[in-house]
Amino acid sequence: MTDALPEIIQGGMGVGVSNWRLARAVSEAGQLGVVSATALDSVLVRRLQDGDLDGAMRRAMSRFPIPGVADAVLRRYFLPDGRPPGTPYKLVSMHRQGMARARHLLTALAAFVEVDLAKEGHAGLVGVNLLTKLQLPNLPLLYGAMLAGVDVVLMGAGIPKEIPGVLDALAEHKAVSLRLDVEGAPAGVTEVISFDPRDQWPADTPLLALRRPQFLAIIASNSLATMLARKASGRVDGFVVEGPTAGGHNAPPRGEMHLTSGGEPIYGERDAVDPGKLVELGIPFWLAGGTGSPSALRAARAAGAAGIQVGTLFAYADESGIDDELKRSVLLAAAQHAITIFTDPRASPTGYPFKIVRWPEDPTAGKAEPRERICDLGYLRTAYYREDGRIGYRCPAEPVDDYVKKGGAVADTEGRRCLCNGLMANIGHPQLRGEAQAEPPLITSGDDLASMGTFLAGRNHYSVVDVLDYLSPRAPVEALL
């Protein structure tokens, strides 16, 4: 690995949108391709249950270095002929504190497969994006990505202060832990999530030599950048600065939240990041959110940034994981300027504002409750202390009665959407419910999507190369770390 990163970082988007094909295409072109690690274990087993038609999953699984793991997963989930019509997907167990070795290994295998395929056949850099907020699967995900030789780890949606030190330890196969946020924790009580790489290997199997990937923290404020630069548990190699126009989850406005007449959060001067102060830290940074244009790239470089992170343009490229019919439908609406992006302060169970795409063919349009409340994936569940002192898990998007029985407030459930199932539907793996009804999609994008008609210029599809030629038709400018 070199000590340089390209000027364009492809965003690590959603569940399976930033898949291995997209990341590999970007990396082959000389920029930083990034795979999303969110819900990768569920993505892997659904691909296997759909028959793994091109054999890519099995090809990468055969290279997983811990013996016996791939064979065990294939026996449990692989269906050579795919699922019979009307058959729901077999689910994986939900993540929790103190998971079994087999569950850890499935999670690590999923990360390995995605990174391994993204790195296959070229020498470019590949990154993996994780959400700090999704605490429970992150340690085995990081280890699996490192077993595949991931070059860069990017993390936001929280304060990833502990992660640099975790990467240092995992590179030496040392045991690691993260603090687990538990609602209602008694004063002075700290819960942790633990993971020991050596416990995953048979006793007589030699460990691989690993290298520590570079770490880029995704931030939304100067103060967070300064804190991480000074107090993180290890080296921070760079920052990605996401503004409120970026897709997916946005940082909430600083201070008390106020809404527009249309119900969207209002961001002000306090929410703007000063690039000049970031330059003073002496750590490279990339600007993100509304940066998907050549002029934005030039402005970022002029402000002292190493480059830009771009999500929306890549999300709808031919190589991305969004279902082809959904992609076609959204791009057609974008070309006709018939897209709106709504920053919903209530939709996400995390409590973070979340951008939702509205377009004429949206199958959930006009439905106050677009799906039955079911929580069967559970990636956004939060831990809480039960009355008996044990740790339980709840999500404000689960059935209201269930949430209230677990001590949650009814008000917390209002307006919540099941991101887990919706985002899985976006990539063509919707769960089937009664009478073979499929879960509806939940499309998220940055504000750039509403003005994509100019970029499309009459096209109804485009490739990663088209995006890169548009953004930076010259040779990549390297930013030394």
Image (cartoon, helix red, strand yellow):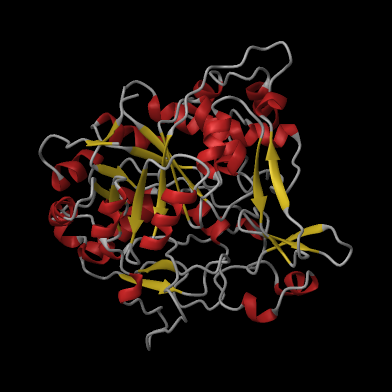
Residue 52 visible in the snapshot: no
Query: How far across and down, in percent of the image, does residue 72 sit?
Result: 69, 25
Residue pictured at 35% horizontal, 71% vertical: 271
Residue at coordinates 79% horizontally, 57% vertically from top-left?
391
The quarter of the displayed image where residue 437 is located: bottom right
Query: Percent x, y for residue 330?
Result: 32, 60
Q: Is residue 86 above or below residue 220?
A: above
Q: Is residue 240 above or below residue 128?
A: below
Q: Residue furthest bottom?
A: 261
Q: How many marks?
A: 0
Residue plotted at (25% across, 58% down): 275
Task: Name which residue lies at 68% across and 43% down.
Answer: 92
Residue 294 coordinates in the image, percent (x, y): 14, 52
Q: Pick whichever, 377 or 190, lies toward us.
A: 190
428 or 283: nearer the eye?
283
Q: Is residue 278 visible?
A: yes
Depth check: give the residue in front, 402 or 130: 130
In which quadrant is the C terminus drawn? top left
- Image location of residue 146, percent across then percent down: 51, 29
Instruction: Pick the residue in front: 381 or 313.
Output: 381
Quadrant where the N terminus sits is top left
**Furthest-right residue in this view:** 388
